[in-house]
Image: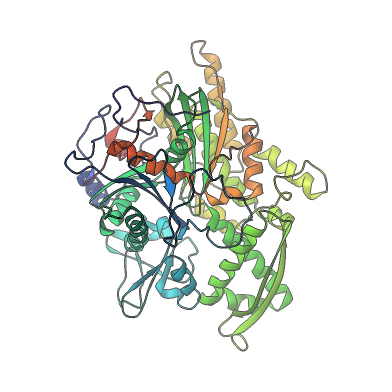
Amino acid sequence: MLGCKTIADGGPRLLHARGAAAPPAAPAAAAAAARMRPARRRGRRAPAAPAAAPAAAAVGIDLGTTNTVVAVLRRGEAAPSVLLADGGGALDPAAGPAAAGAAAGPPPFAIPSVASVAPDGSWTVGAAARARAASDPQNTYSSAKRLLGRAASEAAAWRLPGFRVVEGPGGGVLLECPALGRPIAPQQVSAEVLRRALALASDHIGAPVSEAVVTVPAHFNEAQRAATLEAARIAGLARVSLLQEPVAAALAFGFGKPFESETLLVFDLGGGTYDVSILDSFEGIMEVLATGGDSALGGDDFDRAIAGLLLSRLSESASPAAAAAAAADPSGARALLDAAEAAKVALSSSEAARARLPRLPAAGHGAGFVALDATITARDLEAASEALRARLWPPLAGAAAECKLELAGGPEAFEALLAARRRGGGEPSDGAGSSSGGVESSSSSSSSSSSSSSSSSSSSSSSSSSSSSSSSSSSSSTGNDSGGDGKQAVAAAAAGAGADKYAPKPRRATAAVLVGGATRMPLVRDYVRHVTGLEPRSDVDPEQCVALGAAIHAALLLGLTSGVEVMDGSYVEEQHARASGFQV
């Protein structure tokens, strides 16, 4: 078991995260991030909370693309708790993970990361905002996390529901807002979601919250982290620490457990981003060995793929013109995505899902509505998901090559297994069969990954100093790669180790951890099981673990709990700008 060790002096240690140099940020964003970073050197302890005003509780926020989750660890409590989104208190920390295949829509602890602006300029956040998406899509914003720190040219390649993206000063992203009569930044949307999260925490604690840990994907670059910090500042946080999501998940899985030596592979497929991190745990000290990711791949893409399948069914049952009208209608597109998400959830526990939309908006076609009644099977989605599955492999293979981790299988063998299943043979899938959430039909999914897939990692202290260049080469892999380049990278790393008799032997993962709601899809679980040769861990809910780990980290920084140490022998502040203490 991955464990957590009490540090001898009882104080929190600096949390490090190993990785290759972050992609260059825009000058303005880089300057902003530099102003926000505390002056420190590697190896120093994270600053403790002021002794004059001890915190009553530590707050951790998983700011997700689709949903946001808040966890709190109060002074005197042994473990953090996840808060219910309706303000009704907290989940029981002793309760086990929620079962997959629950009803469509966010779980009770999740705040939908959606914000809507009314004509009077007031904001609505969460489930109420999500409900307004179909009736007022131009003023309702979702998946804003994908746009943080991005250039407008990048966002132009993505299909976003309802609202329009325009180019701002310096080529950055702005969102049209007819209700306000001016464009807004994605940071404003994320700030409104964070405000809602902080209000929940404040109500639960009984005191204002001015400091928190907010999580970000491991592959976020400096501009994206700076934009996240700006959103936290707009939301009212005086001090904030950013923590990588896979590291937060590892903290949650290891907290309070016996310390044994493990090599942990964290597979994080959230609503809009994909991360892979490999960590070593020895006597409770965790070291981040390698990270990789794709900042434009997640559950939202599976929803869009399923929506594409629904449109195909509509084209067959009604007409191509009806399908085109529904896709072009902002309200129709939103309704299709909602139906697609419901189908994705249903397919986590059954072999087929039915979508019924008797009055699907389709402006300009007939009476302005069309009827959709379609069934999507697990096999339908399995056959349609090849492009998305191809994008899972390069970041995973690149990270494995960097730390010389042997994987049990590659994508070609997994695809052969799926083909055998479709022919009626092959081993059974997890859950209901080989159901999955599907792929964004087409080459658009693959092409969008060309500019967004990244894999950053660093070798351990015994590895060569050329890890940065190796990581660069692995990060150039895109979703158009069927997986061959990634396998060659792993083979090359193994060959290099064999050529040097003093090089460490290839390592094998001893545990696989699934993080993010999209990992509930049986196809994703099967994929991880196949490439790692391990049964994925399920002792912490994949949609709660990041927030729980963030709260643990916040408690460490504030001195509310005993320490965990996450080491990194190659941390370079100027390159990574990883936030490891509360920032002003």
Residue 391 in view of the camera: yes
Residue positioned most to the bottom: 367
Report the coloring of the rendering: rainbow
- What x and y, as percent, mark residue 38? 21, 39
Tell me what residue is drawn at x 56 percent, y 39 percent.
539
- In this view, the residue in front, 330 or 281, is 281
459 up-or-down from 575: above or below: above
Q: Nearer the viewer, residue 347 or 103?
A: 103
Q: Residue furthest left?
A: 52
Which one is in front, 403 or 481?
Answer: 403
Question: Please, is residue 175 above or below residue 574 in the view?
Answer: below
Percent across and percent down for residue 307 are: 61, 65
Q: Is residue 396 found left or right of 554 in the rendered image?
A: right
Tally the marks: 0
* Residue sitting farthest toward the top: 501
Residue 121 placed where, x, y %? Answer: 31, 76
Residue 413, placed above or below residue 441: above
The location of residue 147, given as percent across then percent down, is: 39, 58
Which residue is outermost to the right?
424
